[in-house]
Image (cartoon, rainbow, N blue to C red):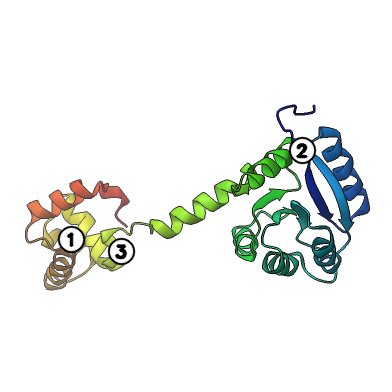
Amino acid sequence: MTNTTDTKRYKVLLAEDHALLRQSLKAYLEAQGLCQVIGEAQDGREAMRMCRELKPDIVLMDLSMPGVDGMVAVKAIKRDYPDARIIALTAHRSEDYLHAALDSGVDGYVVKAASAEDLLTAIRAVCRGEAYVSPEVSATLITGYLRSARPERTSPLEGLTTRERHILQMVLKGMKNKEIAEKLFLSTRTVEKHRANFMKKLDVHNLHQVREFVKISGLEVEAIR
């Protein structure tokens, strides 16, 4: 359906090596009344040349084309014609690829599996000076940001050896040093040494503090392995 709220027809350069997809995109965009396709490029080098000659408002750039790579073309176009708004069209959804595309200078990132309406939304957004990323991959950006901004919490028990964890578990079950030694076929002195080691690592000084530590940490006795 044609959007009647848009009065300007944006000049668009299509850079896509698949002719059928170019033709489909051109037909769709012009049918909406939002865009006028003023040029079609089959590779990155041709896109760079046509951008200099035609000065489009928007470049729809396939990032995987023969010859000059799409990201190389994006960098060159942004360097020579900074007013151009470039929307990447790609099948890639990985975080690394997305970051590389954004670093190259694209203003929008639309996956080819997205809806046609998503492409129109991207065009309107970048022409307002906003960045746009398809919903299909925006979650990737958020996840990557949260992972770098909030490192995973490590359990305070990770500093304990397997033997120390095992003895800690038995202590929390109320077993005495002698009982633990007999069950593990160790000397009582060895058990006492392991017990002193895990208490030092956990910065606790008695059994009550050990229990409080486990309680505050939200740990289950059976989960201590």
Please tell me whether mark 3 sits on a helix, a strand or a loop: helix
Say which amino acid is labelled 2: Ala
Residue 174 visible somewhere in the drawing: no
* Picture disc at residue 30: none
Tag 2 near tag 3, CB within 8 Å:
no
Q: Nearer the viewer, residue 3 or 199?
A: 3
Answer left or right for 50 relative to 180: right
Query: Which corner quadrant of the image does residue 5 belong to?
Result: top right
Q: Nearer the viewer, residue 1 or 35?
A: 35
Q: Are marks 3 and 1 in contact (CB under 8 Å)?
A: no
Q: Position of residue 102 (x, y in %)?
A: 61, 60
Q: Secondary structure at mark 1?
A: helix
Disc 2/disc 3 C-alpha distance (Å): 50 Å
Q: Which mark is residue 116?
A: 2
Q: Type of residue at label 1?
A: Ile
Disc 1: which residue: 180
Residue at 7%, 61% (x, y): give it: 205
Which quadrant, please, contains the C terminus? bottom left
Rendered position, 154 above or below 3:
below
Task: Give 36 or 220, whichever is nearer the viewer.
Answer: 36
- The residue under label 3 is 158
